[in-house]
Image (cartoon, helix red, strand yellow):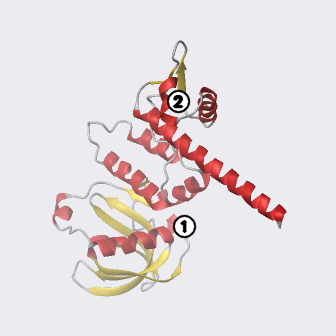
Amino acid sequence: MVIYAIIWHIKKMIGSSFEKRAERRSRLIGLLRSEEHWKTSNLREQLGISQRTLMRELAELRNASYPIESDRGRGGGIRLDGRWGIERLNLNHQEVVELILSLAIVETLQSPLLTSNLKAIKQKLFQAFPQKQRSAVSNIRKRIMIGDNANANMVSQYTTPAQQISGSIAEAFLRQNYLEIEYQSEAGELTLRKIEAQYILLNWPIWYIISWDHLRASSRVFRIDRIKNARLVDGSFKIRPKHMFTGIYRPFYQPI
């Protein structure tokens, strides 16, 4: 029992020490980002650590690919490279996709100002995520198409879908769950459909679901603003090959 008690205390001490170091490192990164330039003496004072400990922490941050630069001379200057931006975002798959999608939408607007680097920014964001998340996000990106802007007549007939409907559609699309929708056709006819939200397409500002429709046993496109109700139902689907849907959307639409 004494041995187990000793081991437990050792583990507790190690865990406590690790938490303190993690907290200290987080504070150090925050300080470096808050100012363009720091003297090592000021950093030591802020963190309450020795020069040796500070140097060790900075070395470990450099090993973790933080672009930390040091100035030689009296006082010793430390700074984080000004080009350093987003480190490792703690985002889930949906948040990552929404962020990249937002950039893709802005890119399609073809604004002459402040959009020349959007494609590069999207790629840098995508590469910043861990490999496992990158793979999952990549698969989702391939299912989101960006097309031309809708014409003025289409836009004039468009109404923004209710949040509950949009949320159900997004969840069904991302999780590959079956979706039951109440759909109103252009002629005003209402039908109840069970669909697979295989792909989605944006002709700004109108969204379309490129689906496998179980009622018709074939592929169909549904305008999201014509969906009057939507709810998730039991069961999940697998992604079907794109060639099964090329007859109902233009294949040159690009994924985000």
Q: Is residue 21 left or right of residue 232?
A: right
Q: Residue at x 49, y 59 (%)?
A: 92
Based on the displayed image, in which of its 4 quarters is residue 36 positioned? top left
Labels 1 and 2: the sequence-earlier one: 2
Q: Residue at x 47, y 27 (%)?
A: 42
Residue 143 in view, yes or no: no
Residue holding disc 2: 44
What residue type is disc 2 on? Arg
Based on the displayed image, in which of its 4 quarters is residue 50 positioned? top right
Residue 232: x and y, percent? 43, 81
Q: Residues within 10 Å of mark 2 (few under 14, many from 20)?
A: some
Residue holding disc 1: 241
Residue 159 in view, yes or no: yes
Q: In this view of the protein, which residue sits in the foreground, 75 or 242? A: 75
Q: Residue at x 38, y 69 (%)?
A: 209
Q: Quarter of the image for the N terminus: give it.
A: bottom right
Q: In this view of the protein, which residue sits in the foreground, 54 or 119? A: 54
Based on the displayed image, in which of its 4 quarters is residue 185 positioned? bottom left
Classify mark 1: helix, strand or loop. Answer: loop
Q: In this view of the protein, which residue sits in the foreground, 13 or 153? A: 13
Classify mark 2: helix, strand or loop. Answer: helix
Residue 82: x and y, percent? 44, 28
The answer for how far apart the CA atoms under marks 1 and 2 are is: 58 Å
Q: Which mark is nearer the camera, 1 or 2?
A: 2
Residue 156: x and y, percent? 15, 64
What residue type is disc 1 on? Pro
In the image, residue 110 sits, relative to residue 76, either above or below, namely below
| Disc number for residue 75 | none
